[in-house]
Image (spheres, coloured by chain):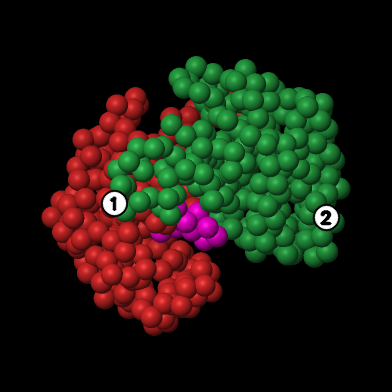
Chain colours: A green, B red
């Protein structure tokens, strides 16, 4: 049985297996070592994910707990309470409490390694165009703002810090890159292919930095590398156990 | 517990989570419905995969069997016995017997749905360039040929047919597309990003055609769609069970 890594979040997680997706990049980098379970729920805020959590990660499930949990919420909580996506809004203090409760649940389950990703920034003009083009909605102002999303990103990082968890602030990371509005995002909110690649790079770097026992080189690798298999003595080679990640 | 789909094969499977990878496209298309386990072993032939099979898919594992197995082998069996990758060569008749034995093992495990992918074609000039550039090997002739790979592809399809399993012949599918040599392959053997996309499309089409109970719309979808969640009555909405794939 390979260790299981769980990616828990909203559409930024559900869509992490799109082309160049950050979730897929983990499966690729950790091939023959782990299984990744994508638990992204598009449109969900931290309140709804917390409500569904006993189903997503039941405490009475047999077997070992996930080896790593990557938690990415807040993009929907940050919807403004007086605009078109008001239903998804969660007040900042509740968002922080929900994040902490999700972490507490994971720790009760026995998850030893947790990495927090904050939501990324929002490009309001693109959100307006997107609403018009995909839903025929001519909005006066976007349902999310870059500034408010930044506050939720900072809050997620703050919760992580208070719980001694590493985090990646995607909001600041993206915002510092010139052209992030259209190069790293595809619709003012979700990651473009280049954005996915960048998040994947950051996640793998963060894992290496904060969880040194979880690098590809540190984890068991199933089956010997084919270059180590002797064509004549292949049975003995296979029986000798796993190999090392090249 | 979500159903598990297992992708079993060689590097064409191990690398199926590269950007635009066909494995990742399944996770993306079936988000909130299934978990995908990538069991690709680069460089392995059918003999070695069969040897490792009791470890990969143990018969005594508790819990339900995989809901679907996608099997893609033969690219390494087709290495020529008198060239630089001779170690990986498996005679055609043994290859067929190994494939049948792997299917038999999966059926003993209780796997009801099995899809066979054949190996794709090989572009010999690119293989020669690749050997020179990556390993400094100035070969006179490539370790694989398009013709011999085609024979292994046909054999895989034949085994699938004889066992009443659907198959996708990647060799013929690729070969019919003008420019496949460099557009669909990245090194004369493995899939380029465009090749990955094409294989992903074909795999999802084949699943829809041959396993109508395994379409995204037919499978349970975890959690209600966020558009169906009432902001005030969210607890009742979540408790009402899963939604429908949009």
Distance between the alpha carbons at the discs numbered 2 and 1: 56 Å
**In screen coordinates, is A28 left or right of A157?**
left
A35 or B207, which is in the foreground?
A: A35
Residue at image mark 1: A232
Tag of residue A175: 2
**Residue B184 percent location from the top left of the image:** 44, 73
- The quadrant of the picture occupied by the N terminus of chain B is top left
Letter of the chain that mark 1 sits on in the rendering: A
Secondary-structure class at tag 1 = loop
Q: Which is closer to the viewer, label 2 or label 1? A: 1
Label 2 crowd bin: few (<14), some (14–19), many (20+), radius 10 Å: some
**Residue B144 percent location from the top left of the image:** 33, 71
**Residue B91 percent location from the top left of the image:** 20, 61
**Residue B218 percent location from the top left of the image:** 36, 44
**In screen coordinates, is A158 left or right of A14?**
right
* Quadrant of the rendered image containing residue B181: bottom left
Secondary-structure class at tag 2 = helix
Residue at position x 66%, y 46% in the image: A204
Pointer 2 and pointer 1 on the same chain:
yes
State which region is magenta: B12-22
């Amino acid at each position: 049985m390979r260790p299981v890594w769980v990616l828990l979040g909203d559409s930024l997680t559900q869509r992490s297996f799109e082309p160049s997706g950050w979730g897929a990049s983990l499966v690729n980098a950790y091939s023959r070592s782990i299984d990744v379970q994508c638990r992204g729920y598009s449109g969900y805020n931290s309140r709804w994910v917390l409500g569904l959590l006993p189903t997503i990660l039941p405490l009475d499930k047999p077997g070992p707990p996930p080896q790593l949990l990557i938690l990415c919420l807040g993009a929907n909580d940050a919807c403004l309470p007086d605009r078109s996506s008001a239903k998804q809004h969660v007040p900042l203090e509740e968002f922080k409490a929900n994040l902490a409760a999700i972490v507490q649940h994971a720790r009760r389950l026995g998850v030893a390694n947790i990495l927090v990703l904050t939501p990324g920034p929002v490009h309001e003009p693109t959100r307006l165009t997107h609403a018009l083009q995909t839903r025929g909605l001519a909005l006066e102002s976007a349902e999310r703002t870059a500034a408010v999303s930044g506050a939720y990103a900072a809050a997620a990082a703050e919760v992580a810090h208070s719980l001694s968890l590493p985090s990646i602030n995607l909001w600041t990371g993206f915002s510092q890159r010139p052209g992030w509005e259209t190069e790293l995002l595809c619709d003012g909110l979700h990651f473009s292919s280049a954005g996915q690649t960048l998040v994947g790079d950051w996640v793998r770097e963060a894992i290496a930095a904060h969880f040194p026992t979880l690098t590809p080189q540190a984890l068991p690798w199933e089956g010997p590398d084919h270059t180590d298999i002797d064509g004549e003595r292949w049975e003995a080679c296979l029986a000798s156990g796993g190999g090392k990640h090249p």
